[in-house]
Amino acid sequence: MGIMPAPTRWLLIGEWRAQPLRIAVAVLAIAVGVALGFAVHLVNSAALASFGRAVASVQGRADLAVRARSPAGFDEALYPRIARLPAVAAVSPVVELQASWGELARPGERGAGAPKVDGGRFTLLGIDMLRAARVTPGLAAAMAPSIGNQPDWDGDPMWLSPALANAAGVKIGDMFGFTAAGIQVRWKVVGLLPGSEDARLAVIDIAGAQWRFAQLARLQRLDLKLAEGVDADAARRAITAALPADAVLATPEDEASRADALSRAYRVNLGMLALVALLTGGFLVWSAQALSVARRQPQFALLAVLGLPREGLVRQLLIEGLALGLAGALLGVGLGYGLASLVVTQFGGDLGGGYFSGANAQLAFPPLAALVFGALGIVTALAGSLAPALNAARQSPAAALKGMGERPDPARPPRAWPGLALLAAGGVAALGPPLWGLPILGYAAMALLLAGGVALMPALVRALLAPLARAGSGVPAVDLAVRRLWGVPQAASLALSGIVASTALMVAMAVMVASFRQSVDDWLVAVLPSDLYLHLEAADAGGLAPADQARLSAVPGVTNVRFQRLQTIRIDPDRPAVMLMAQGGQASLPMVARTDAPAPPGSTAVLISEPMAWLYGWRVGAVHGVVIGGVERPLFVAGIWRDYARQWGALLLPMADYQRFTGDAHASEAAFDLVPGHDAGIVQKALHEALPPAVAGQAQFGRPAEMRKVALEIFDRSFAVTYALEAIAILIGLAGVATSFSAQVLARMREFGMLRHIGVTQRQILAMLALEGSGLGLLGALAGCTLGLVMALVLVRVINPQSFHWTMDLALPWPVLGGLVLALLACAAGTAVVAGRRALGQGALLAVRADW
Amino acid sequence: MRAETPFAMVQPFVAGPPPLIDAAPILSAQGLAKSVPAAGGPRRLFAGLDLAVAAGEVVAITGESGVGKSTLLNIIAGLDTPDAGDVRIAGQDVARLNEAARAALRCRQLGFVFQAFHVLPHLDLARNVALPLALAGMPQREALARAEAMLIKVGLGGRGGDWPAALSGGELQRIAIARALVHAPPLVLADEPTGNLDPETARRVLDLLLAQARDEGAAVLIVTHSEMVAAAATRAVRLTADGLAAGTTLAA
């Protein structure tokens, strides 16, 4: 091996052989950081890629598409107008409906509030095969061979993508029952769509789609093929000019980038958490290297005397760090890949977050990303080794050889200003705005706070213990322990850095998750004031007609019903659709802002959700134009409510205004207040019987308690990854405490030898070590908790609003925090005693004799 | 558990100097033998070793490196066990004492001076010196006062609040001597006490050790390579594999 000179290699191997456990923990810490970052990246790129492929399949790879702003579609008269534009070579009209299959909920059987089965949804496309063949041959080709086979067109034939056929468990020749636009049907599966493995998609003939699903004269999409040699921008302008208010022009990239935007905040959050884990690894490398340098001072002095220059020593120590980082990086990339495969098969591509339902993620191994994440690990390890290396090079070899080298000097107090400066910088960064829509400054604030907190530890330990050290307890074991922690806080803080970093990280995440959970729980209570809820699946069009609504209101036991209509509308083609909620009766919402000012004449008062306010920059009291029912309507923002349900915005409109705008008198949800004393189960049964048969199959009933339970279960599942990260953080922290503290104890063998010579028993030394250990653990835990709470504030007040566009109230999980502190104390004291036993054998007595 | 400190059991011993029986040696060792494990079977360090040190005596033990001089000191202090023979300190058979009682014996009867000083860096000078008193349960104020008095005797008066980091080797060894004598032990064990010092400093440190020991009436057993140290002793013996060979008795 010619990379390193022989002495470097000897020293490196010698050190690794002498300290295998500590080296292993440092390598593992780096590996975990690299693995987490790499795994999050892998899982997300797999999910995004498959989502992108799914989107492409649904769209059939047209050049451009005109899309309806809402699922109600636009008038099909637009189709000939667009087809006549010179820039357009061909147009394929498409009916696009969201559909679901299967029995979603039967009253009494599955809990009424049973989680909606994501797998039960798919996209139903109605296309004109001949026209589609020119614009989106991918879609049409699926149907082409069947034409030769003369399928029975009267028998309602449909073609499924393999993903949908698999998920629904149907094969060619089966009758497939599903619901779309509020209408239940059973159609015959006559073929599979090639080249659309990732999407859950079904294709039928456009005439059947319009006729059978009440979409007469309506279209949701026009797929366009541009004429050869046409300037794309000019074509876009010409097409846009011809569009009515209820249609927008979109490109396939818009869809993919929306999918990217959809999960970006979530992804960045996890990625940043992984980087914080890596940072913790860096602290562990630093503490391992610093301890090892302190222990090897005489060795280095000898090397210096033998002719190794200072730069050579620095290089030697950096090579050790590099080797550590390299091992950690290799291990981390492997671990990350394994973790990602596990996650993708177990949880799906969105880590349980629910962002990419309906897409099957497949994992690939990207060499470039592996290199980048591996390099991050190596850089972290090098950075952790730099300070100890420079410190070692500063020592005077002559003094070190005599055992008089760097002696800890309690007369020199540790400096507080670097830590304070870092903390201040963190505070300033936390106040910064989001960059590129991401809370980058917020995360920088977290990192700065972490570094500042760790850097401040020596000064803090000294300040906290000063009164104890001055007073003295009269119990030698206690005084010795206190005076050592007070007198040599730099050594103590080496052991502390890992624990402070990981405790802070963990407390921050625990507090954030607890706050979020508490706020979601409070929110659920606030938004679910009624006794019983009804939701119709896949009822973007159709639903409960006025007569149905009257029948439901008359069911015995029901005192009051609020009907609601949910519609998605597209305000900005670059952003995901916004939920338009039309509500009858008095809305009960947790408001975060409101105005009592009346709506200006001609405008309609609406409430908007918190994410809506963030994303579109709408303020209370402002008026904005929004296309509803094909006409732009001025809407007055009368208030903002807290909404955790729809990350991309929601807009609440009185039912009367909605009906006036759209003429749509249907409802898709209802909230029932019951007469006190009436059994909700009996009323639910009666309501179900009162539903028209066409929608009864789509009906899902829910009671607040169950809905809350289910919502919180989903919440816990999607935060499972966070809990795993927390567990890993505490394990790294505890391992760091164990290794660094035991190394320090072993390095103090001579001290123990001397104490035993002057009449201290082994038990008393162990008592002293246990006290030191638990004191250290207590300090680390307290400092880590304090720092973690500050970081939690940054997470709750800065990072979450900036990435998810909602706010939450701070809640502290006391049992978790208390348990954490106790675990740290036990671990630190236990490690100290175990290491002490090792250090107290015959070796301690001989060490007294050692001539340094 | 008792309410006192874990060191309280030592307390009865610190009341004052032990009653010495005239002519009875403070240290007597008889028939000591010790082997250490080595490649190719145990290696004998020494056997049949007899040694008696009376109050006021200064005995220097010389011998080649590896002959077991430090092991002998550890056996005397009850920190190591001999394969054969017994050690009595102030009439007490060390082998019959349990761990706690041995620790108490060291705390009360013995003072230690090491080649590498072993002054704790995180304690100030007064507390380093007061350590044996504090271990024996003496109240802090009194222990520190006695330590200050002891610092004056070793020429470092008024520096009790200083930290070891600022001290030279000679000064550190003076702190160690003060620590070894502050509780007036009848026997001081010194292992190469001048090994890390230049000859001039060594001379002064040795003089200080012997003068203070004389003042406190302590016997001193010194393991050394230094002829200067051996010459200053009242009796010098050489440790060999067959026990102790009488050296020359230089001083009366």
Image: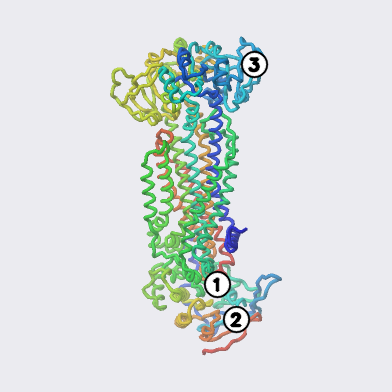
What residue sits right under mark 2 in the picture?
A: B63
Residue type at mark 2: give it: Gly
Tell me residue A492's x, y (percent): 46, 58
What residue sits right under mark 3 in the picture?
A: A146
Q: Nearer the viewer, residue A302 or A456?
A: A302
From this view, report whether residue B7 is shown above or below residue A423: below
Tell me residue A408's x, y (percent): 44, 65
Neighbour tally class for label 2: few under 14, some 14-19, many 20 plus, Cα within 10 Å: some
Query: Residue A849 shows which numbered tag?
Result: 1
Query: Mark 3 or mark 1, which is nearer to you?
Result: 3
Instruction: Name, please, the residue furthest toward the right.
Output: B40
Q: Nearer the viewer, residue A514 or A96?
A: A96
As drawn, is A585 to the left or to the right of B96?
left
Query: Residue A805 shows which numbered tag?
Result: none
Callout 2: SS? loop
Residue type at mark 3: give it: Ser
CA distance separating discs 3 and 1: 94 Å
From this view, report whether residue B222 is shown above or below residue A598: below
Callout 3: SS? helix
From this view, report whether residue A227 is shown above or below residue A470: above
Chain identifier of the residue bearing label 3 in the image: A
From this view, report whether residue A50 is shown above or below residue A733: above
Residue type at mark 1: give it: Arg
Q: Nearer the viewer, residue A168 or A80?
A: A80
